[in-house]
Amino acid sequence: MCVGYCRHQGHSSASHWTQGCLPGHHLCLHEAQSGVCCCCSALRPRYKRLVDNIFPEDPKDGLVKADMEKLTFYAVSAPEKLDRIGSYLAERLSRDVVRHRTGYVLIAMEALDQLLMACHSQSIKPFVESFLHMVAKLLESGEPKLQVLGTNSFVKFANIEEDTPSYHRRYDFFVSRFSAMCHSYHSDPEIRTEIRIAGIRGIQGVVRKTVNDELRATIWEPQHMDKIVPSLLFNMQKIEEADSRIGPPPSPSAADKEENPAVLAENCFRELLGRASFGNMNNAVRPVFAHLDHHKLWDPNEFAVHCFKIIMYSIQAQYSHHVIQEILGHLDACKKDSPRVRAGIIQVLLEAVAIAAKGSIGPTVLEVFNTLLKHLRFSVELEANDLQGGSTGNANLNTSSKDSDEKIVQNAIIQTIGFFGSNLPDYQRSEIMMFIMGKVPVFGTSTHTLDISQLGDLGTRRIQIMLLRSLLMVTSGYKAKTIVTALPGSFLDPLLSPSLMEDYELRQLVLEVMHNLMDRHDNRAKLRGIRIIPDVADLKIKREKICRQDTSFMKKNGQQLYRHIYLGCKEEDNVHKNYELLYTSLALITIELANEEVVIDLIRLAIALQDSAIINEDNLPMFHRCGIMALVAAYLNFVSQMIAVPAFCQHVSKVIEIRTMEAPYFLPEHIFRDKCMLPKSLEKHDKNLYFLTNKIAESLGGSGYSVERLSVPYVPQVTDEDRLSRRKSIVDTVSIQVDILPNSIPSDDVTKATEDLRV
C-alpha cells in the first residue's frame, strides 16, 4: 500500500493509514474519525479546513488556539462565509453529540462562542440560526453536562446586542426546554440543582434577549408566560422565612445567584416583572394565581404573600392597580372555595394595597371597597346559614369550625378595608366613609344599598357590626379642619341611626366612629377610662378656639347629638364600655365644639340624665341607674374644671366628696368594678348626694354665663328613628321642643318629678 505523510503526527507507517474516499486515496486514523480525506483536504473549501484545524487529535488538549485565531480572522474578514462556517460546525457537533464525543462537543461550542462574540455584522443572522440549532441539540441531549453547556452558550448569546432585529426568529423551543429543566428531578441532588440553575439562567437569557429585541411582545404571550412564571415560582418555594421580610425583598448577592436556585429564580422573577409594560402586566401575573391554586398555597399563604410583595415592588408604580384588579378578580373566582383560601387571598390583597397605597392606586378605589363589601356580605350570609342549619353532634362541631373560619375571612376583609381607607387622601376617604355608611342596613329602612334579603336578623346584625368596624378603621386618623367636613348631615344622620338599636356592640361602634371624627387634637387617649379626674390640667388637653363653622354645626346638629347620648345612656343592655364611650363623647364635644351656649346645654343634658336615673320611668336595673349617676359625676367634674368656674368646681367637688363617704356606688371608680354593693332604692337618699340645678345656675351666673336655660329641663324630641331602630321608644314621654326660649315654662309633669332637686 502506498502511504502518504500524515499532517497531524507525521506518521508514515502503513498501520496509521486506511482506505480513503476514492481508489488510491488514503485516510489517516485521526481524519477517519472526522471523516476528512487527507488526500482531498487540499481540495476542500478553506473555511472547512480552518474549522478542521481547530480540533486536536486528543480532545483533552482543548481548542487549538492558533488555528482558532486564524478561523476568527477569516470569519471577520469574510463575514459572508459565517453562515457556512456555522453550518459546518453544526454538522460536526451534531455528529459528535450522537457519537457521545463530549470533548469535541465542548471544543465546537467554545469555537462557536468565540466566533459569536467576535463577529458583529448583518451577516451574523444566518450564523445565529446555526448556533441556536446547535444549542437546541445540546439541550435535547440527555447529558446534564451538555445541557448546562448549551445553556451557558445561550446566555452568552443573549447578552449580545444585534445591530438589526430578527423578525423571523422565535424562542418557543428554548422557553419550553428551559422551563422543563427548571423542574428537573434528577436522582443526584447536585446534578439536579445544577440543571435547575441552568434552566433558570436560560429563562433569564430568553427574557433579556426578547426584551432587547424589537419582537419583545412574543415572550409575553400567554403560552410562554404559563411556562416561565410557574417554573420560577416552583424554584422560589425553597426560600425560607420569606414571610418575615419587611419592605422590598433584598437583592441577592452574586454568590447566591449562582449557587441557589431559589434566589436566582426570585431575581429572574423580579427582572421579568420589572420589564413588563402596561399591556403585558396581566399575562405575567395570571400564571401566579394558577400556580398558587394548583399547589394549594393560599392556606397557609406565606409564599403567596411573598410572591405578591415581589410583584408589587418590582413593577412600575403606575401599574399597581392592575395587580389589585387581578387579585380582586381571583377573589371573585374563588368565592365558593374554603374560608381559609378566601382569607389567604384577602390577606394577599392587604399586602398589595399596603404597598400600592404608597404610590398610585388608580381608579380602583371604589372597586376595591365594593368587592370587599360584597364578599363580606357573602361570608356573613354563609355564617348565618350555617348557624341556622346547624344540628347537634358532629355536625355542630363542623358548623362551629366553619363559623370560626368565616370570622377569619371577615376580619381579613375589615383589616384590608381599614388599611386601604386609612391610606387614602382625605377627599377620597370622605367618599369611602359615605360609601360604607350607605351599605349599613337599618331595620325598617331601605336606604342602604346592600342586599340583606338572605341574611335574616342574625346575619343582618352581623353585617351591621362588620360594616361599622370597617368604618371605624377607615376613620382612624382622619383629621378634618372643621367638624362640618368630618360629619356632614348626609353622613351624620345614617351614622346615628344604629346608635338607637337594641345592641350594645353596635352603639359602641357608632360612638367610636364619632370619636375618630371629633377628636381633631388627639385628646381621646387622655380621656380613656371613665373616672373622677382630680386635676384636669394634668392631662394637658389640646384645644383651639371654636371656629364659626363649628359653632354653626352645633346650632344645627347639637340637639341631635344630645338626644342620642341621652337615649344611649338609658339602654338596658349597656355595659361598662358603653358608659365610658358616652362619657368620652361628652368630653370631646366639650373640648372640640363647646362655646358658652353649648356648655349650658351639656350641663342641662347631664342634669336630665341624673333626673332620669332617680325617677326611673324606664324601669332600668339598679346597676344602670348607678352607672348613669357615675357618668354624670365624671362629666360634671370634667366640665367644671374645663370652664374653671370656682363656685361650680366647689359644688361638684363637695357632692363627689359626700358620695365617696355615703354613696360610693354613684362614682365610676366603684360602680364599674366587680362585686360593687348596690343600694335597694334611690328614694331615701339625701339631696346632698345630687348635683343641684339651682346651685349650678348660681355659680355659673356669678361668672357671667347666661343661665336662664338651666331652669328648662332637657327632654329629647321623638322622631321616626325610635320606631325604625326597634328600641324601647320614649313616645310616652312628654316631648318638649329642645331649643325653648329662655322665658318658656317647662311642663308640669317634668317639673313635678324633679322639683326637689331644683330648689
Image (cartoon, grey):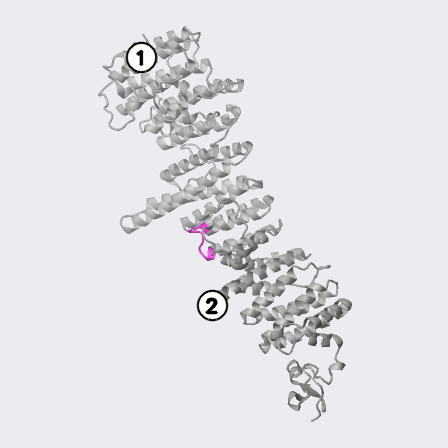
Q: Amino acid at mark 1?
A: Lys
Residues in magenta? 293-302
In the image, residue 300 lies in the stretch drawn in magenta: yes
Between residue 250 and residue 277, name the one nearer to us. Answer: 250
Residue 95 left/right relative to 553: right
Seen as rendered, the residue at the extreme top is 702
In the image, residue 235 lies in the stretch drawn in magenta: no
| Mark 2: few/some/many CA within 10 Å (<14, 14-19, 20+) | few
Residue located 65% across and 84% down the image: 32
Between residue 222 and residue 180, name the one nearer to us. Answer: 180
Q: Position of residue 210 (x, y in %)?
A: 64, 58
Q: Are marks 2 and 1 in contact (CB under 8 Å)?
A: no
Q: Position of residue 638 (x, y in %)?
A: 38, 18
Q: Amino acid at mark 2?
A: Asp
Seen as rendered, the residue at the extreme bottom is 1
Q: Position of residue 106 (x, y in %)?
A: 61, 71
- Looking at the rendered image, the disc whose residue lies closer to the viewer, 2 or 1, is 2
Can you tell which quarter of the image residue 197 is in? bottom right
Residue 399 left/right relative to 423: left
Can you tell which quarter of the image residue 105 is in? bottom right
- Quadrant into which the N terminus falls: bottom right
Can you tell which quarter of the image residue 388 is in? top left
Seen as rendered, the residue at the extreme right is 77
Between residue 68 and residue 402, name the one nearer to us. Answer: 68
Tell me the SS state at disc 2: loop
Whether residue 503 is visible: no
Of the two numbered discs 2 and 1 on the same chain, state the one appearing first in sequence: 2
How many marks do you count on the picture? 2
Q: Which residue is mark 1?
A: 654
Q: Which residue is mark 2?
A: 188
Residue 533 left/right relative to 259: left
Q: Position of residue 678 (x, y in %)?
A: 24, 23
